Amino acid sequence: MNKKYGGIVVGMTITLNVLVAGPISGGSMNPARSLGPAIVLHSYKGIWVYIFGPLIGAIAGGFVYNLIKPTNKSFSKLFKLT
């Protein structure tokens, strides 16, 4: 994919999340927007998602990136199958 379409892809992802996932779950995409009021109101029900979700997503994203990044090595050498 050409780099000039990156902004469009990010924007479409956010739009899809707002229009589809937001009404279904009622969650926010910004953890600070959920953590701040929860801490002020001392309402900690379900707050673990906004604490651990970004951490788990970052770790999973790192693994996925390592799987799909271009390389000159063969598949068997990447995963030491020989």
Image: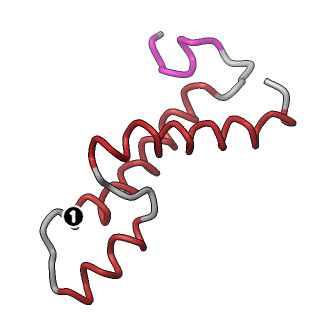
Residue 5, horizontal then vertical, whole percent: 80, 33
Q: Residue at x 76, y 38 (%)?
A: 6
Rendering coords of residue 33 (x, y %): 41, 72
Q: Position of residue 57 (x, y in %)?
A: 41, 48
Q: Is residue 18 above or below residue 48?
A: above
- What residue sits right under mark 1 in the picture? 48
Residue drawn at (12%, 68%), measured in percent from left and top?
Answer: 45
At label 1, the amino acid type is Trp
Q: Which residues are magenta?
A: 74-81
Q: Is residue 73 magenta?
A: no
The image quadrant that residue 4 belongs to is: top right
In this view, the residue in front, 21 or 50, is 21
Residue extending farthest bottom: 40
Q: Is residue 2 left or right of residue 46?
A: right
Q: Is residue 32 left or right of residue 8?
A: left
When the figure is inspected, residue 29 is found, relative to residue 16, above or below; the finding is below
Residue 76: say if magenta.
yes
Label 1 neighbourhood size at 10 Å, few (<14), some (14-19), many (20+)? few
- Find residue 43 and report its horizontal and vertical position in percent: 15, 78
* Element assignment for label 1: helix
The quarter of the image holding the N terminus is: top right
Question: In the picture, residue 31 is in which quadrant?
Answer: bottom left
